[in-house]
Image: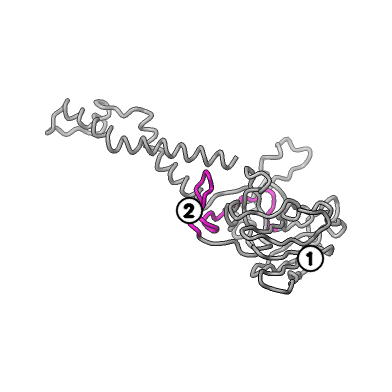
Amino acid sequence: MANVFSLILVIVTLVTGIVWLFDKLVWRKKRQEKVRELVGDNQKVDEQTQAKIAPQPWWVENSVSIFPVIAFVLVLRSFIYEPFQIPSGSMMPTLLIGDFILVEKYAYGLKDPVWRTQLVETGKPERGDIAVFKYPVNPSIDYIKRVVGLPGDVVRYSGKKEVCIQAKGSDECKPVALSNVEQSEFYQDGIPLIEMQEHLGDVEHHILVNPLRRDRVSQYHPRGGVNEWVVPEGHYFMMGDNRDNSADSRYWGFVPEGNLVGKAVAIWISFEFERDQDSILPSWIPTGVRFNRIGGIN
C-alpha cells in the first residue's frame, strides 16, 4: 500500500510539475500577448481584467496551485520524515498500538520513492536502533523491529530468553545485559508479563517476556531447533521488544539492507483505542490521547 501511494504521489507531482513548467514558460506568455493585442502595450490592466480577457484553464490553475504543495510532501515523505502507525504489540513496551511515529528516512541512505534504489549513502543501522523495513517475505508490508544483529555477527537466543552476540571479528559471545526485572502492567492470555531493561549496544530499553511461555524453537528459520544465526553481509537480524509476541528474524530470516526504510525517532501522537464492550463506538475510533507518550523513543 505504501509503495502504491508513493507511485501515485510521484505521478501527480510529475504531471502537475510539467503543467506548472509549461504555464510558466509558454502559456502565460501567450495569455499576456493576447491581452496586449486587445488593450495595447501602454494601457495597464489589473489581474482581474487579465483573467477575463485570457482566462487560465481550470486544470492549469489547479495544477499550478497544488504542485508546490505536492512537491514539498513528496520530498518530505521520501527523503526526510515519514509518519507510520504502530499496528501491533510486537514492540511493547517501547511502542504501543495506537502510537504514531516519525521515521527518519535519510538515516540509512537516500532512496528513490518508487523503485527504492539507493541514491546516496548516509549511514548504516546501529545495534539497538528501531528500524522500519520492508518485510522480506512480502515487501509490500512495512515492519518495525529492533536491530539486534549486524552483518557478520553471530546471534544466539537461549531457552532462558537471553540474547548473546558474537560481534564480527570477535571470538567471544557476549550476553546482552539485563537488569531491573519486575512484573509488568501488561498481560498475555491472562498472564502478567515480566518487564526488564536490556542494554543493547549503547541503547538501554525495556523488553517483555512471558515467563510461562516456551519459545517456539521448532519454528525457527531456517531450521527448527537451531537457535544460532550467522548474519550475512548486507543483512540485519531484527527482534521485537515483546519477545514472546513477535514474528521477527528468528522465524522468517534476515533483513536485506535494500529493504530498510528508515529509523524510528519519535512518537508524534498516541491514541488510546480501548473501549468497553457496551460502547457504541467502533474499535478504530480513538477514545483518548496518551499525551505522556509524545516525544522521543528508545
Q: In the image, what residue occupies the spot 74% across and 71% down?
A: 173
For the record, the magenta segment spans 94-121
Residue under circle 2?
A: 119
**Magenta stretch encompasses residue 288:** no
Q: Residues within 10 Å of mark 2 (few under 14, many from 20)?
A: few
Residue under circle 1?
A: 162
Residues at marks 1 and 2, CA–CA distance in whole angstroms: 38 Å
- Under mark 1, the amino acid is Glu
Q: Is residue 90 visible?
A: no
Tell me which label, 1 or 2, sits earlier in the chain. 2
Q: Is residue 113 above or below residue 153?
A: above
Is 220 left or right of 73, judged from the image as shown? right
Residue 237 placement (x, y as % from top left): 68, 59
Position of the C terminus, as image quadrant, is bottom right
User: Splitting the image into 4 quarters, where does residue 203 fall?
Assistant: bottom right
User: Splitting the image into 4 quarters, where does residue 206 fall?
Assistant: bottom right
Q: Which structural element holds mark 1?
A: loop
Q: Which structural element holds mark 2?
A: strand
Q: Is residue 106 above or below residue 18?
A: below
Tag 1–tag 2 contact (CB < 8 Å): no
Q: In the image, what residue occupies the spot 73% across and 35% down?
A: 280
Residue extending furthest right?
A: 212
- Of 257 and 276, which appears nearest the observer? 257
Residue extending furthest left?
A: 42
Is 251 left or right of 109, judged from the image as shown? right
Residue extending furthest bottom?
A: 171
Residue 150 placement (x, y as % from top left): 65, 63
Is 187 left or right of 38, judged from the image as shown? right
Q: Is residue 277 visible?
A: yes
